[in-house]
Image (tube, grey):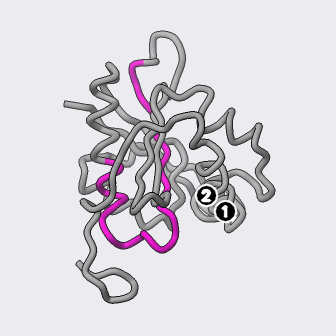
Amino acid sequence: MTGHDGARVTATTVALHPATPDEYDDLFTAFATIVDAGDGFPQGPSLTRAAFDDYWVAHSSAVWLARDSGRLAGAYYIKPNFVGRAAHIANAGYFVVDGHRGRGLGRRLVEHSLEQAQQLGFDAMQFNLVFASNPARSLYRALGFQEIGRIPAAVDGEDALIYWRSLP
């Protein structure tokens, strides 16, 4: 596979590890950049650190980072999608930093999160708000997710989809 500059790259050169609190500033900066660009998440621009911490860190069962030569390349979180008796269904959110996209890292993050979710005791994964324009939709289908719902005009007039799959 070739990267944006034509150099041969693979997602396997990127190291995944659980995030530590001293990495949250880096994670916040990357996520806020994606949010400010309106790129795949429903948060509005000028995301605050408190809002980020509440959404990405505070309620998560796991937060994982992908680093390429020490630089943040992507990340994901896993958390219960629901409370109480439905807390066995996980939710996850992902991002890949611009410049690292198109290298297979998104697939690697999703596959890794499915393994981690199962290890954490979840038996299914659900994504609640996948924009209709999100190119990851084909990846989700390839990994066994089913589209189980559509929310018309969910964000700025764009439909959002709900995806679900059981974990083996």
Q: Is residue 64 above or below residue 85?
A: below
- Residue at 51 percent across and 70 percent down: it is 98
Task: Name the residue furthest left.
Answer: 168
Please state, as top left, top right, bottom left or bottom right, where the C terminus lies in the image: top left
- Asked whether the residues under the numbered discs 2 and 1 touch, taking CB atoms below 8 Å apart as contact, a structural biologist would say yes
Residue placed under numbered mark 2 in the picture: 30
Expressed as whole percent of the image width and height from the top left, the position of residue 81 reads 50, 28
Looking at the rendering, which quadrant does residue 167 occupy? top left
Which structural element holds mark 1? helix
Side of 81 relative to 163 (left or right):
right
Task: Name the residue furthest top.
Answer: 85
Disc number placed over residue 79 in the picture, else none: none
Please state, as top left, top right, bottom left or bottom right, where the N terminus lies in the image: bottom left
Magenta stretch: includes residue 131? no
Residue placed under numbered mark 1 in the picture: 33
- Residue at 28 percent across and 27 percent down: it is 118
- Residue at 68 percent across and 33 percent down: it is 54
Expressed as whole percent of the image width and height from the top left, the position of residue 61 reads 47, 25
Which structural element holds mark 2? helix
Mark 1: which amino acid?
Thr
Assess disc 2: are there few (<14), some (14-19) or many (≥20) residues with their C-alpha within 10 Å of its C-alpha: some
Q: Which stretch is magenta? A: 88-110
Front residue (pair 39, 89)? 39
Magenta stretch: includes residue 97? yes
Side of 53 relative to 94 (left or right):
right
Side of 124 relative to 75 (left or right):
left
- Residue at 77 percent across and 37 percent down: it is 50
Q: Is residue 102 above or below residue 78?
A: below
Front residue (pair 72, 150)? 72
Expressed as whole percent of the image width and height from the top left, the position of residue 161 reads 49, 51
Q: Is residue 141 above or below residue 115?
A: below
